[in-house]
Amino acid sequence: MKFVRPISVIHTAHNLKGGLQLAEFAGRLCYKSEGKIKPGSYQKFLLMLMNKGHTSILEHCPIYICGYKNDLGTVANAIIKSSFSRFTTRTDTVTSTNPFYYIYSNLRVVYDFDSDFAKQLVMTSTMKGDDIWKDQGVAWFVPKFNSPYARMSAYITTLRSIVDDLVRERIQSCAVESTRWCDYSNNSKFEGITFCLPHWINYSIFDSCMKRFLADVKEANINKDKIDKLYDYEDIAFCLYQNTEAIEAKRCYHYIRSSILDEILYNEAKDELKLPAQDAGEYLFLGVKSEMYYTGYNEDWDNIIDKRLYDKYGKAHPNMHITMQQCKDHLDVIRISQKAITDSDHGGESESAGE
């Protein structure tokens, strides 16, 4: 049994190779196999997902291409016409009969139109895939990451209840740690269940309570059997809860105790009821730690932040506020810092990197 605090980090990709690596990370997160990531491992992994039809993961790989309208090949034309893509026109060609487009999309859009072309992009040895894009009359460009159409990915660790809320925002692309395929029993690679601390837990007081709990565990005569040992832990947590008056400490001991009880039920389901992980997972309560990869356009991120942080359409859960504040803070840093870089490199022109 472990406890973590909620945390969110934003990832971006400047080139095709970086985007393919983001997609691999998103896919492996579902099965908690990130340890298998090695240089170039994304190629075999993504091809395997394509061949199995698990193509939603490809949405986490952004595609940024640009070119003149009359030069666009069939694939590029299909991308720009997709409802999942966005595009802008270079300002000096807006009124031209042959405008210059900056196209923002993702690899799944490419795959759905031409799977072989998508596989070529996965297998390219270049950073941007220019050897493949040139036949489509386009080239890769680096977007300004304060652009409304730049795609941002959040690596989120939070409570399962918050993940369940976030996946309702279907405009975003989601990859979630699977409680069906991940085995959280004490003799698995996870060595027990990890729980995420909710907003009503004071972190510093929780740390003190855990220190006291572990000290009592160390002094107690703990049973060696895996399940009986957990019952001994629960007895200690219950005694601490009963003998504590301060409400914030009492909350901490209660959360520790409830987490132990959840771990007991999960391990009994696995060991005594002989249930596989996909069925034992039904014993996990909503405070269990859950990781997700969450990708979307900047404009959609802003909309979600309005709803889930600033309560635009009704009050969001305080745990959601924590996650969205972390995402917003990191998004702000990336948008400002990368804007300074692109403005310096390209004279402040709108998306001029692809010229």
Image (cartoon, rainbow, N blue to C red):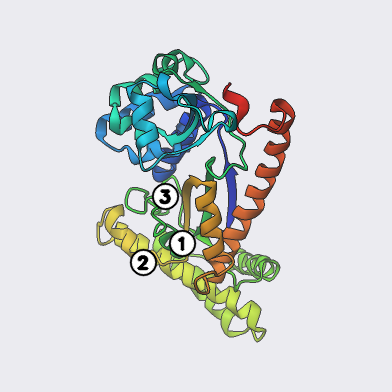
Residue at (44% x, 43% y) in the render: 29
What secondary structure is found at the residue carrying circle 3? loop
Q: Which sits earlier in the primary sequence, circle 2 or circle 3?
A: 3
Q: Which residue is tagged 2? A: 265
Question: On the rendered structure, is 86 left or right of 310?
Answer: left
Residue 261 at x, y = what percent? 43, 70
Q: Which residue is mark 1?
A: 288
Q: Amino acid at mark 2?
A: Leu
Q: Nearer the viewer, residue 181 or 79?
A: 79
Question: Crowdedness of circle 1 by 10 Å Cα count: few (<14), some, many (20+)?
Answer: many
Q: Earlier in the sequence, mark 1 or mark 2?
A: 2
Q: Which mark is residue 177?
A: 3
Q: Residue at x 37, y 29 (%)?
A: 46
**Is the C-beta separation of discs 1 and 3 under 8 Å?**
no
Amino acid at the residue labelled 1: Val
Q: What distance separates the C-alpha of mark 1 from that of mark 3?
A: 11 Å
Instruction: Give the class, few, some or many, for how many residues have Cα within 10 Å of label 3's Cα (few <14, many ≥20).
Output: many
Residue 113 in the figure: left or right of residue 225? left
